[in-house]
């Protein structure tokens, strides 16, 4: 759920930056610096969340590997 909120936030921020850019108003263009910083911060947050998720998944697989070793999978 947290990942989705980061993606939604970036979607909003990107739209905001685009609106500022299209307006060509100097004050709005200057605000884009902070908007872009927030987008970058969200990207790093997204990377951290997926890294944590990957690590958790890896740990689960490693814990269950001895159990799965004895399971036969019939796909045909």
Image (tube, helix red, strand yellow):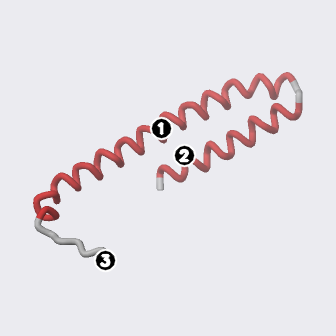
**Dots 2, 1 in contact, CB < 8 A:** yes
User: Looking at the image, is 35 positioned above or below residue 9?
Assistant: above
User: Looking at the image, is 29 positioned above or below residue 6?
Assistant: above
Comparing marks 2 and 3, which lies closer to the viewer? 3
Mark-to-mark CA distance, 2 and 1:
8 Å
| Closer to us: 64 or 29 | 64
Say which label, 2 or 1, has the lower sequence index.
Answer: 2
Comparing marks 1 and 3, which lies closer to the viewer? 3
Mark-to-mark CA distance, 1 and 3:
42 Å
- The residue positioned 74% from the left and 27% from the top of the image is 31
Please give the residue where the numbered disc 2 appears in the rendered image.
6
**Dots 1, 3 in contact, CB < 8 A:** no
Say which label, 1 or 3, has the lower sequence index.
Answer: 1
Please tell me whether mark 3 sits on a helix, a strand or a loop.
loop
Which dot marks residue 76? Answer: 3
Q: Residues within 10 Å of mark 2 (few under 14, many from 20)?
A: some
Q: Residue furthest front?
A: 76
In the rendered image, residue 73, in percent from the top left (x then y), is placed at: 23, 72
Say which label, 2 or 3, has the lower sequence index.
Answer: 2
Left or right of residue 47, residue 71 in this image: left
Q: Residues within 10 Å of mark 1 (few under 14, many from 20)?
A: some
In the rendered image, residue 11, in percent from the top left (x then y), is placed at: 66, 46
Which quadrant: the C terminus? bottom left
Q: Tell me which corner region of the image, top left, top right, bottom left or bottom right, holds residue 13.
A: top right
Which dot marks residue 45? Answer: 1
């Amino acid at each position: 759920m947290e990942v989705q909120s980061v993606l939604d936030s970036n979607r909003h921020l990107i739209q905001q930056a685009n609106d500022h850019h299209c307006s060509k108003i100097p004050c709005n263009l200057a605000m884009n610096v902070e908007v872009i910083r927030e987008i970058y911060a969200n990207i790093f947050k997204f990377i951290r969340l997926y890294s944590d998720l990957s690590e958790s998944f890896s740990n689960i697989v490693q814990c269950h590997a001895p159990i799965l070793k004895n399971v036969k999978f019939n796909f045909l």
